[in-house]
Amino acid sequence: MSLRPLLLLALLLPGLAHAVETVGRIAALVGSAELERSDGSRVALQARMPVAMGESLLTGPGSHLKLLLRDDSLAKLGPDSRMRVEHLKGVDGADTEISLDTGRLRSVVGRRLQGSEGYRIRTSVALTEVRGTDHEVLHIPAHGTQPATSAARTFEGLVTFGDGQGHPPVALRPNFFSLVRPGAAPQPARPIDPGTDLAAQLAALGIERPTPQSVPGSGALPVPTTPGGPFDRAGGETPPPPSPAQLLPPPVPLVTPSMPTTLTLQPSSGLPMPELPQAPEGSVELPIDIHLPTP
């Protein structure tokens, strides 16, 4: 037997393994979201779907998803957002790096990366290096007369935030945020209330998020039928609880229209009592009131 086919297979196996290498899986999905492959084709996302390096994740209005990475980090992508994993530590030999094209991304860094600088989030104008555990980045692309803006906040741990172009970064401790624009140094860290939404904080400064249709290439998706809830600590928007009516099973018919529920019998000497109708198969038997008039 020739060894040439076996040697050729041995050379191809590493490339095949790399081609199917995944960086994580969709842990949760609310609303509508899509996965854009390297060839530009798109497929609808579903829970547990694997995500490969370089593939983009896009969410629609009111939608969000959670991506569980292989380094145990959890990335939560908010509504009208687009991200992709460029590198993943332990997979391609580089530190973990995520690109955020638009929208918001909240990350809870895995234990293996805590305390290190092996986790970065990059936008078109900012670079966030994470040493902490729980943080959020919001990127607003340029639209109209408003330049592109990136902002970051820290919930737990420590984050360094800058433009990645030589300006000194700022350190963000818990409950502090900063923002940066093209060609400028990041603004000094400012406090932010834990219950304040970062987008609302920027809106108070006159920095508004555009509608998805006004941002070219934002990948706007249809409005989902499942609404989202408040932004929770675990990096997700918890769906509202079902109403009591939604928890009840559908009503089951107890009697059929042909079954009387009340019978009135007239006394008559020598006559037998009438028989009651039989309930159809599958019906529930109920007691029937029988009224006998007094003589």
Image (cartoon, rainbow, N blue to C red):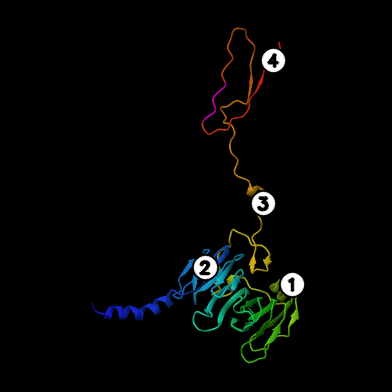
What is the CA distance from the residue labelled 1 to the residue labelled 4? 74 Å
Say which of marks 4 and 2 sits in front.
4
Q: Are marks 4 and 2 in contact (CB under 8 Å)?
A: no
Residue found farthest to the front: 1
Of mark 3 and mark 2, the one earlier in the sequence is: 2
Residue found farthest to the bottom: 166
Q: Is residue 143 left or right of residue 88?
A: right
Q: Amino acid at mark 1?
A: Pro
What is the CA distance from the residue labelled 4 to the residue labelled 2? 72 Å
What is the CA distance from the residue labelled 4 to the residue labelled 3? 47 Å
Residue 12 location (% of width, % of height) = 36, 79
Residue 52 location (% of width, % of height) = 48, 74
According to the picture, the residue beneath numbered tag 4 turns out to be 293
Residue 119 colored magenta?
no
Q: Are marks 2 and 1 in contact (CB under 8 Å)?
A: no
Residue found farthest to the left: 1
Q: State which region is magenta.
A: 276-280
What is the CA distance from the residue labelled 1 to the residue labelled 3? 29 Å
Q: Quadrant of residue 16?
A: bottom left
Q: Residues within 10 Å of mark 4 (few under 14, many from 20)?
A: few
What is the CA distance from the residue labelled 2 to the residue labelled 1? 31 Å
1 vs 285: above or below: below
What is the CA distance from the residue labelled 3 to the residue labelled 2? 29 Å
Of mark 1 and mark 3, the one earlier in the sequence is: 1
According to the picture, the residue beneath numbered tag 2 turns out to be 34
Q: Nearer the viewer, residue 135 or 185?
A: 135
Residue 53 location (% of width, % of height) = 49, 76
The reply to whether residue 268 is visible in this rendering is: yes
According to the picture, the residue beneath numbered tag 3 turns out to be 243
Of mark 1 and mark 4, the one earlier in the sequence is: 1
Of mark 2 and mark 1, the one earlier in the sequence is: 2
